[in-house]
Amino acid sequence: MPKQILIADDEPTVVALAKQKLMGLGYGVLTARNGKEALDLIQKGGIDLIVTDVVMPVMDGVDLYKEVKKEPRFAHIPIVIITDSKIFRDSFQTLGVEHFLPKPLDGEKLLHKVDYIFCCEELERKNRQVLILGTDAESIHDMGMILEGNKFVVGKGMDPIEFISNCLILMPKIALVDIMVRGDVPAKEVIRGLKCFSRLRDTKILVFTHFDPEDIASMQGIEELREAKNICIDAGASEYIGRFTPATFWDSVKGYFD
């Protein structure tokens, strides 16, 4: 599916030029005459890049930028600001804007800017691989949804051999392993296996667990969990991030992606 680019500008000639150039290279293009129309389109999903003027009726480019960036689902979308005003440019830079195009809009400069952004995004994406090995399908699905929502490329599974193979192919930044993986290849052996390969030396191995509180009520259960954690750490895991819960998971792992 082609990348979808949203052009927000109330000048028809600018919109027509941008649309012609971008569609000529195979990009999908949506257009809006003001920030409110743009925001409505963004909330429907599927937008990969926003190119917007500053001065527009109903909602200007400043308010559009702020609305997009305060919504976690859309905050990752790159935004290019079209402006010939140094004051506007300086103001947007204080908000964190990195990408600008001068007025009047030049079609070739637009294409170069778009290609640059998507190339950088692809390089970053290759460094945002995460693989998950778990024992509970619902938990690893929820983990994946949280990570994908933060623009990570996620592989999920419950087969230790397949997990190790995928790690060797993809060389993920993070490998998440449930300490309660058992069977012929338990969690400790998965970790030891990963640590054997020099090509995975930069992969952080984070271990976690999944359980319902009532399943761990006994002292025996607590000791079993503690022993499994210690065995995995001794096998070479980078860190134990605790029990998976959707409410706390992102806070427990986000520091490892810096």
Image (spheres, rainbow, N blue to C red):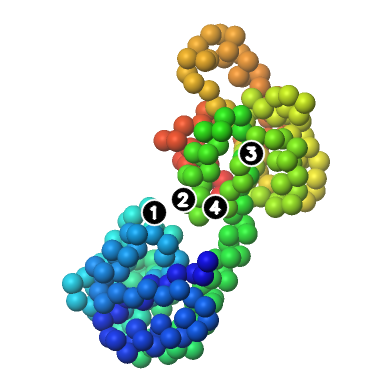
Instruction: Using the rendered image of the protein, determine whether residue 148 is visible from the camera's viewpoint.
Output: yes
Q: CA distance from mark 1 to mark 2?
A: 7 Å
Residue 115 point in image, percent of width and height: 54, 77
Tell me the SS state at disc 1: loop
10 Å neighbourhood of mark 1: few (<14), some, or many (≥20)? Answer: some
Residue 38 point in image, percent of width and height: 30, 69
Q: Is residue 121 above or below residue 52?
A: above
Q: Residue furthest front?
A: 1
Which of disc 4 and disc 1 is earlier in sequence?
Answer: 1
Residue denoted by label 3 = 157
Foreground mark, 4 or 3?
A: 3
Pointer 1 and pointer 2: residues touching (CB < 8 Å)? yes
Q: Is residue 215 left or right of residue 13?
A: right
10 Å neighbourhood of mark 3: few (<14), some, or many (≥20)? Answer: some
Q: CA distance from mark 1 to mark 4?
A: 13 Å
Pointer 4 and pointer 3: residues touching (CB < 8 Å)? no
Instruction: Using the rendered image of the protein, determine whether residue 258 is visible from the camera's viewpoint.
Output: no
10 Å neighbourhood of mark 2: few (<14), some, or many (≥20)? Answer: some
Which of disc 2 and disc 3 is earlier in sequence?
Answer: 2
Q: CA distance from mark 3 to mark 2?
A: 18 Å
Residue denoted by label 1 = 73
User: Residue drawn at (70%, 29%), measured in percent from left and top?
Assistant: 187
Pointer 1 and pointer 4: residues touching (CB < 8 Å)? no
Residue denoted by label 4 = 152
Foreground mark, 1 or 3?
A: 3
Q: Residue furthest left?
A: 58
Q: Is residue 206 above or below residue 166?
A: above
Q: CA distance from mark 2 to mark 4?
A: 7 Å
Residue denoted by label 2 = 149
In the rendered structure, which amino acid carries the disc numbered 2?
Gly
Which of disc 3 and disc 4 is earlier in sequence?
Answer: 4
In the rendered structure, which amino acid carries the disc numbered 4?
Phe
